[in-house]
Image: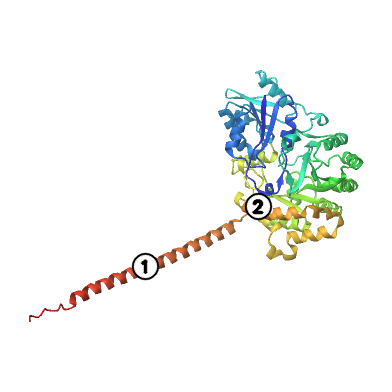
Amino acid sequence: MKILLINPTGHKIGMDHFLKAPPLGLMTIAATVPEHEVEIIDLRNYDYKPEFVERKIKQFDVIGVSSSTSMINESLKLCRIAKENDVKTIIGGVHPTLVPETALYPEVDLTVRGEGELTFPEVIQAIDQSRQLKGIKGIAFKNGSELVCTETRPPINLDEQPFPRRDLVRKYDYHYFWASIDAFESSRGCPHQCHFCCISPHWGRGWRAKSPERIIEDFHHMDSSKRWFIFNDSESTLNMKRLEKLCGLIKEYGYHRKWKSCQGRVDDVVKYPHVIEKMADAGWKMIFIGIESIHQKSLDTIGKRISIRQIKHAVKILHDLGITIFGSIIIGNIGETKKDILATIKFAEELDIDIMQFTPLTPYPATKLYEQARKNDWIVDNDFTNWNLVTPIMRSDTLPADEIHELVKYAYRDFYLRFKEKRQKFFFFRSARRLLRNPRFWWFWLMARKFVINGLKTYKDFMADLTSREYLEMQRLKEEKKQQKKLRKLEKKQRKQEEKKKKQKGQKFRDIENKKMTPVPIPTQE
């Protein structure tokens, strides 16, 4: 069979302008059906004309689409094109797992729930042999108007997971801030229960990890020409003994020369600073941490289970070791006022975080926050396209959604921009000072040129989504004045023309009258 796997498109917004990550899930799924012809197209990160996509879909027997919540509408569009051309459609990923009812859409033949490494090849075999789907675990499909969800598939052993088909995306250029990357997965799940997080509903409660030896095997399969090796995990630092052993193997096999990035928790950083130091020596250059708020009450409310003291301590540990911090802050936490949010934004600047992401509180399906938001009628936008972690789709108990949106935009502008107001505290100046003072950060200057050049090119697109209501109103008034000025000029010009015509008409009338009054000479007789 011919199988086309598609990473669907979506509106580029916020940090999407600076990051292009490979579709690791599709690459792994592709490796599970080696006996079939498989191709991957990445619409998320690269532009293709609609006609090309439709022509492509027509050439295959089955399409598989991976979908997050914000991309589900685009995924359904692709499925509609496929059904119009008699192509089977399968949707997998986070959204169909959280919302099994996705399988009821007429353009969807079935959905894969949770992990697909064992499920997908069974589905393809059933389609190829025209067998029934009921015996396959971990799927959902419709029987008439009825939704059928088969038994949930048990978690797989990640060490037995196939190596991703990197050859299928070699034509694409993936990057983090224009430094080339390759990505892999070292663990799945998370035992923590943050109220806004959909990791546990998707992967199942708990945390599973690959052994350090298997991770080294993954490194063997990755593209050695890439600068970054990215850990595509929800949580990489839960077992620090595992990481400590991995650091030893990384240095043994020479992979410490590759820059690495992962996601971790501040409490893990604080508890195991000696392991973080070994990670720095093994090539770790960036760690993503969730800061979320400066207010302890807010952290407790969302189930984060960290303290403000731990956040400050973790930032110092990482910066002292030359590890940059990609931080995340939630705008619009339950119970927070505008004053509270402004204090958190200021806190992010005072911490001197290297890269900051500001996201509105978003209640993804199947999370505790989603249940709370539905119960309190906080959700104001049910169009999943807007559930993109920049556009607020819910109000809080203290702030309306449009006010939260303005605060998200203000946070980005205040953290990265405002040169005239901040001067010496301007983002690039304060970052450059710290990067120059600590020799452990000098690695950054190897990517600084591309970062600056491409950042300036992308600046306008990034700012287009962050324009404030006040600025838009100011621009509207400015444009209105401009149009009024043009109108006044036009009216003045028309008046002048009319006056000129009147003068010309009056002169013509006077000429006629003068002609009438001019005495006609009487001829004399001789």
Quadrant where the image shows the N terminus: top right
Tag 2 or tag 1, which sits nearer the N-term?
Answer: 2
Against 153, is 179 above or below?
below
Q: Position of residue 376 (x, y in %)?
A: 62, 42
Q: Position of residue 292 (x, y in %)?
A: 74, 49
Near-viewer residue (519 or 513): 519
Looking at the picture, which amino acid does disc 2 mark? Phe
Near-viewer residue (468 or 457): 457
Against 196, is 416 above or below?
below
Near-viewer residue (307 or 482): 482
In the visual, does 197 lie left or right of 481? right
Which residue occupies 70% across, 39% down? 368
Q: Which residue is mark 2?
A: 462
In the visual, does 411 lie left or right of 231? left
> Residue 175 appears in which quarter of the rendering?
top right
Q: Secondary structure at mark 1?
A: helix
Against 476, is 380 above or below?
above
In the visual, does 176 lie left or right of 73? right
Q: Which mark is residue 497?
A: 1
Which residue occupies 73% across, 43% down? 174
Looking at the picture, which amino acid does disc 1 mark? Gln
Which residue occupies 88% across, 40% down? 246
